Image (tube, rainbow, N blue to C red):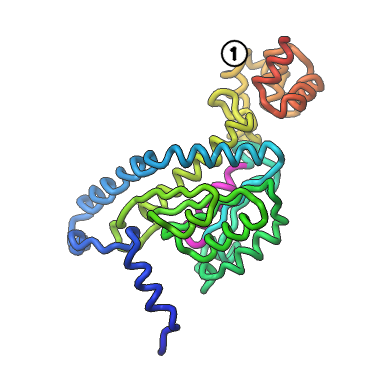
Amino acid sequence: MTLPSHRPDLRAQLEQLATEAFRPELSGIDRLPTLEIARLMNGEDATVPAAVAERLPEIAAAIDAVAARMARGGRLVYAGAGTAGRLGVLDASECPPTFNTAPGQVTGLIAGGREAMVSPVEGAEDSGDLARADLDALGLTPEDAVVGISASGRTPYAVGAVEHARARGALTIGLSCNAGSALAAAADHGIEVVTGPELVTGSTRLKAGTAQKLVLNMISTITMIRLGKTYGNLMVDVRASNDKLRARSRRIVALATGAADEEIERALAAADGEVKHAILILLADVDGPAAARLLEDSGGHLRAALAAAEG
């Protein structure tokens, strides 16, 4: 069997990446006791937050840019392959129940589509054209923000997504775990969290994946804070879609207002279950329609709605 001609070049590229480096001191790890391997792995994981901390100024600048676009009606789109793509889809899927985001407001694209969430899709990550097609299917606009995610920083799907989005006028962010990456260079905001060689050579679902998860948590969570989806550290836009979330909704209203259970139930009923509206009803002493108007006029920011009601 003859390998495609590009393979030697790709091998050489990978050998230059910190995330792919071989660590000879760990070559006997399979002969160690399980507890010792767990200690080694835990020690490796403990280095990730420090690597993220080094990139906080770049992360914050990217978040502010995303929030500004989303405040004007734009969307947040993650694009990646393999582990990176799955992490993007995961972060996007958690936004509706946590922050009551509208359908499609935060979206995750993974090379190969839904099937790739659970099974590898041959060659999907190697196609920049596939990324462009996936973004075109979303009807990308200049108000949108696209985050390309790739541990190596060279994955064609992620790089292609960022290049195409930038050409369309969208905001672009490149999140990688290697310095000097093509992905960061292609983006408006490059974030390179250098986590170094993995415990298992090249297994970037480990430290690199953990770093990506931490950064994606920051991007979505802090963006939603900037958009008024929280009141202090309370999830006032939580979507109460099950018993646990309904109980959480009541607790959030109680923490925000100090009201008695009976008052909370009446306020939630008047607000059709909307936590933010119920808090405003209780704190500003208004009815449901008035709370809805105040929040609409304030762009959904509860603090601004409270100030308007008081003044």
**Measured along the vertical axis of the image, is residue 86 above or below residue 256?**
below
165 left or right of 176 in image: right
Measured as percent of width and height from the top left, residue 97 is found at 62, 40
148 left or right of 19 in image: right
Query: Was residue 94 drawn as part of the magenta stretch in this picture?
Result: yes
Residue at 68% over, 44% down: 74
Residue at 56% over, 60% down: 110
Measured as percent of width and height from the top left, residue 268 is found at 71, 23
Nearest to the observer: residue 192 or residue 88: 192
Quadrant housing residue 275: top right
Disc 1, SS: loop
> Which residue is outermost to the bottom?
1
Magenta-highlighted stretch: main secondary structure? helix
**Measured along the vertical axis of the image, is residue 12 above or below residue 245?**
below
Measured as percent of width and height from the top left, residue 257 is found at 61, 15
Nearest to the observer: residue 302 or residue 255: 302
Q: Which residue is mark 1?
A: 258
**Measured along the vertical axis of the image, is residue 1 above or below residue 111?**
below
The residue type indicated by label 1 comes to Gly
Query: Was residue 78 drawn as part of the magenta stretch in this picture?
Result: no
Nearest to the observer: residue 178 or residue 284: 178
Measured as percent of width and height from the top left, residue 85 is found at 52, 57
125 left or right of 236 in image: left
Q: How many badges with numbers are in the image?
A: 1
Sort mark 1 into few (<14), some (14-19) or many (20+) by Cα contacts within 10 Å. some
In the image, the segment drawn in magenta is 81-95
Which quadrant of the rendered structure holds the N terminus? Answer: bottom left
Residue 270 visible in the displayed image: no
Quadrant housing residue 139: bottom right
